[in-house]
């Protein structure tokens, strides 16, 4: 099996660029070659990064700058990551133009949806109606905390082979509306959007949970990463 290069974005703070090793471990175990992508403001270098990878993995992190989707900061907005939104938006643009697989995780699912014209909640607990479940679990990262119901006939359904799975959860923001060429392919029982995917690209998915954190103890998480790398193999070939 060919080993495609998977570009992985990082967390950005005053301390520099960081990345939990769970992302790298999941890609390595799925026979992909992880390549950590360093933020740059040079448009040519951003395109060069995409030109040299076979798939793009958008990782989790802090909150998204609300100006990106035309809103003022909500009182419960958390810490943002300077420059990351613009950088990852440019990565997404080039990745979709090139036609390579894109997997967005948590924050990555949100920036993917926003870039494509969707909307999001800055804080689900104060902006969504009804009583919500706990979406920032206190349990360990590999604990499967709540249910996600999966839309039949979606790519996600084809990957995991189930209409309901258990996932971990670490967020207070979430996607709201999706663009016309996307569908909502996963919802938690309280109505929070858990998965979005493109209907016009071969493999472009955003997941609100962290399958890299449950990769070694959950079959659905393994299937997601294996399918992502397999899609990159097809691009690589």
Image (cartoon, helix red, strand yellow):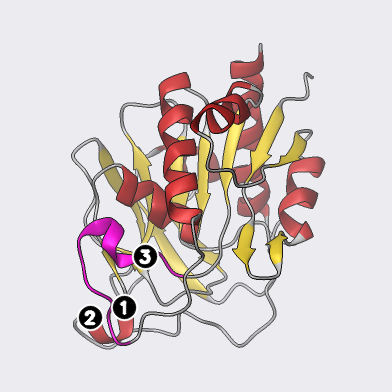
**Residue 143: percent from the left, percent from the top?**
66, 75
The residue sitting at 44% across, 38% down in the picture is 90
Main secondary structure along the magenta-highlighted residues: loop
Between the residue at mark 2 and the residue at mark 1, the CA separation in whole angstroms equals 5 Å
Does dot 3 land on a helix, a strand or a loop? Answer: loop
- Magenta highlight on residue 223: no
Disc 3 marks which residue? 65
Q: Is residue 48 left or right of residue 85?
A: right
Observer-nearest of 30 and 16: 16
Give the class, few, some or many, for how many residues have Cα within 10 Å of label 3's Cα (few <14, many ≥20).
many
Disc 2 marks which residue? 127
Give the class, few, some or many, for how many residues have Cα within 10 Å of label 1's Cα (few <14, many ≥20).
some
**Label whose residue precedes the other's in the sequence (3 or 2):** 3
The residue stretch that appears in magenta:
63-75
Q: Choose mark 3 or mark 1, whichever is in front.
A: 3
The numbered mark at residue 189 is none
Residue 207 visible in rendering: yes
- Most extreme residue toward the front is 42
The N terminus: image quadrant = top right
The numbered mark at residue 124 is 1
**Residue 198: percent from the left, percent from the top?**
34, 36
Observer-nearest of 22 and 52: 52
Q: Quadrant of residue 32?
A: top right
Does dot 2 land on a helix, a strand or a loop? Answer: helix
**Residue 185: percent from the left, percent from the top?**
35, 49
Observer-nearest of 29 and 87: 87
Q: Choose mark 3 or mark 2, whichever is in front.
A: 3
Mark 2 and mark 1 residues within 8 Å of each other at the beta carbon: yes
**Label whose residue precedes the other's in the sequence (3 or 1):** 3
């Amino acid at each position: 099996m060919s080993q495609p290069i998977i570009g992985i974005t990082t967390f950005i703070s005053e301390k520099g660029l960081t990345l939990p090793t769970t992302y790298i471990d999941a890609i390595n175990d799925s026979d992909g070659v992880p390549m950590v992508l360093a933020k740059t403001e040079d448009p040519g270098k951003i395109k060069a990064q995409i030109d040299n990878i076979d798939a793009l993995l958008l990782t989790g992190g802090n909150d998204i700058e609300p100006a990106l989707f035309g809103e003022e900061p909500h009182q419960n907005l958390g810490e943002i990551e300077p420059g990351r939104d613009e950088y990852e938006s440019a990565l997404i643009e080039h990745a979709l133009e090139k036609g390579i697989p894109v997997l967005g995780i948590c924050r990555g699912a949100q920036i993917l949806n926003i870039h494509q014209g969707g909307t999001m909640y800055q804080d689900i607990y104060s902006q969504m109606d009804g009583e919500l479940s706990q979406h920032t679990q206190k349990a360990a990262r590999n604990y499967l905390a709540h249910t996600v119901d999966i839309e039949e006939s979606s790519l996600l359904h084809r990957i995991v082979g189930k209409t309901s799975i258990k996932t971990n959860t670490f967020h207070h923001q979430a996607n709201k509306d999706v663009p016309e060429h996307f569908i909502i392919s996963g919802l938690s029982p309280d109505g929070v959007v858990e998965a979005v995917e493109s209907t016009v690209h071969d493999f472009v998915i955003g997941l609100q949970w962290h399958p890299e954190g449950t990769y070694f103890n959950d079959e659905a998480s393994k299937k997601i990463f294996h399918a992502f790398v397999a899609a990159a193999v097809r691009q690589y070939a």
